[in-house]
């Protein structure tokens, strides 16, 4: 067995063992990566290099946007913006079976598009809609599964940090084109989950008695306009080149803060310290996860595991359909163990040239890759959005996995469409002249 495959086996076995033993995810990632490099390096240089990789992994300019988007998400949650988006979403769900679950999906898409964070969407929407669903008789595992399955749509519907990372590592792919390309796949993800909800809710008899009068609908729409304008300001500003993605995150913070303090008046200045502390804590968790994921990314690159995987893949077949299917499978596996940013940094240079030889546009490949890695955020063992959704839903992973399987089937179906129908990703950027 060569070094690459030995490292992969060590990572897989040690990581699964540590997770089953109950170790924190970040610690398990770091230790399993160190164990995989020990056949090559002694313990002391391995530990020193691992520490260096943590710092280098988080010393990326684009990551500055993360704390600001998290802060914006917390402000929106505490400041009443999230609840207004939920009320706005209810206008579209009406009294169809599973109306509250449909509302959760639409609200996740809207909130994710504003905050750019799947974990923020899962946290905000799950905390608000979950108790209401439970009160109306919804099974809490079903509710948690809906919230978890659709929270990543905000990573496809811009703004999205991973799209910016991909644009840089792919050699200058247009960020604006990627942003536009993410809309249809992200919306299709949400619609596929809504189809699952409809079938399940109709079977269980989940219906909402709530109805809006014409006056109430107008009021809800009017109150939601300022919140929805944030999408126009942030995305419009980035696409037009008025500011960068990081500056857009700052703009989202300033706008949401002004909206919550002075327009909705739903938070006070005395509430800000708690919001800042909560945001700092969540930022620390996410950044640390990214940092330790960088150790694994370095170990994999050092041992040549990605190259070995790529060579094995090309040795199987040269049929484009087969190769793309293999890439999807590999990315799905990678996404379950690695953070999106390190995975994007490592596997883009490996898979993009192969796909370009097949005539695939870099924008199309970027959306396919990000779609795969988004799925990884809601799958064990290291799916951060999965763990946030489970915690907010007051349930356990083993209880929520069964209802999640139905959503996975629907999401995988959309993934295949995105992979084999380029127009789903390329039509909107082409219409706007970005590709």
Image (cartoon, rainbow, N blue to C red):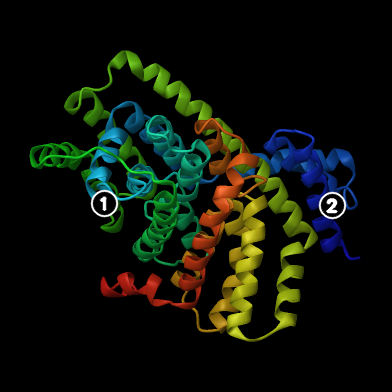
Return the residue at label 2: 10
Determine whether the residue tagged by mark 1 lies in a helix, strand or loop.
helix
Q: Position of residue 181 (x, y in %)?
A: 37, 66
Residue extending farthest top: 270
Left or right: 303 with respect to 410? right
Location of the N terminus by quadrant is bottom right
Determine whether the residue tagged by mark 2 lies in a helix, strand or loop.
helix
Residue sitting at 40 percent across and 39 percent down?
A: 69
Left or right: 111 with respect to 335? left
Can see residue 166?
A: yes
Residue situated in front as seen by the camera: 56 or 161:
161
Q: Position of residue 284 (x, y in %)?
A: 56, 31
**Placement of 325 over or under 208, stated as above or below:** below
**Placement of 7 over or under 53, stated as above or below:** below
Return the residue at label 1: 237
Residue sitting at 86 percent across and 61 percent down?
A: 3
Left or right: 254 with respect to 411? left
Q: Quadrant of residue 173?
A: bottom left
**Foreground tag (1 vs 2):** 2
Say which label, 1 or 2, has the lower sequence index: 2
Residue situated in front as seen by the camera: 173 or 399:
399
In the image, which disc is placed on residue 89? none
Q: Quadrant of residue 74?
A: top left
């Amino acid at each position: 067995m060569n070094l690459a495959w030995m490292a992969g086996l060590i990572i897989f076995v040690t990581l699964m063992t540590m997770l089953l033993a109950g170790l924190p995810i970040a610690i398990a990632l770091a230790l399993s990566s160190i164990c995989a490099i020990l056949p090559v390096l002694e313990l002391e240089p391995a530990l020193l290099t691992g520490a260096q990789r943590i710092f280098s992994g988080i010393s990326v300019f684009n990551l500055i946007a993360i704390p600001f988007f998290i802060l914006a998400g917390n402000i929106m949650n505490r400041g009443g913006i999230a609840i207004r988006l939920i009320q706005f979403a209810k206008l579209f769900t009406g009294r169809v079976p599973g109306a509250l679950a449909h509302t959760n999906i639409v609200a996740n898409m809207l909130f994710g598009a504003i905050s750019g964070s799947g974990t923020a969407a899962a946290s905000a929407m799950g905390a608000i809609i979950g108790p209401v669903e439970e009160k109306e008789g919804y099974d809490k595992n079903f509710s948690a599964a809906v919230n978890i399955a659709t929270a990543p749509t905000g990573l496809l519907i811009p703004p999205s940090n991973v799209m910016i990372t991909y644009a840089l590592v792919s050699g200058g792919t247009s960020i604006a084109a990627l942003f536009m390309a993410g809309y249809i796949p992200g919306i299709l993800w949400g619609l596929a989950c809504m189809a699952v909800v409809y079938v399940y809710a109709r079977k269980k008899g989940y219906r909402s008695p709530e109805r809006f009068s014409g006056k109430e609908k107008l009021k809800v729409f009017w109150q939601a306009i300022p919140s929805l304008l944030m999408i126009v300001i942030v995305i419009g500003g980035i696409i037009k080149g008025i500011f960068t993605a990081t500056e857009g995150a700052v703009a989202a913070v300033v706008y949401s803060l002004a909206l919550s303090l002075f327009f909705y008046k739903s938070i006070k200045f005395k509430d800000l310290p708690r919001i800042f502390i909560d945001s700092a804590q969540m930022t620390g968790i996410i950044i640390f996860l990214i940092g330790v994921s960088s150790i694994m990314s370095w170990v994999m690159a050092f041992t040549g595991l990605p190259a070995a995987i790529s060579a094995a893949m090309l040795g199987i077949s040269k049929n484009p359909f087969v190769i793309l299917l293999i890439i999807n499978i590999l990315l799905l596996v990678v996404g379950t163990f690695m953070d999106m940013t390190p995975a994007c940094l490592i596997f883009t240079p490996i898979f993009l040239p192969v796909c370009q030889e097949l005539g695939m546009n870099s924008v199309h490949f970027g959306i396919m890759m990000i779609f795969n890695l988004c799925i990884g955020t809601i799958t064990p063992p290291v799916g951060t959005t999965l763990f946030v959704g489970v915690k907010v839903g007051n349930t356990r992973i083993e209880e929520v996995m069964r209802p999640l399987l139905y959503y996975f089937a629907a999401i995988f179906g959309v993934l295949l469409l995105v992979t084999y129908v380029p127009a789903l990703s390329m039509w909107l950027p082409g219409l706007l002249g970005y590709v």
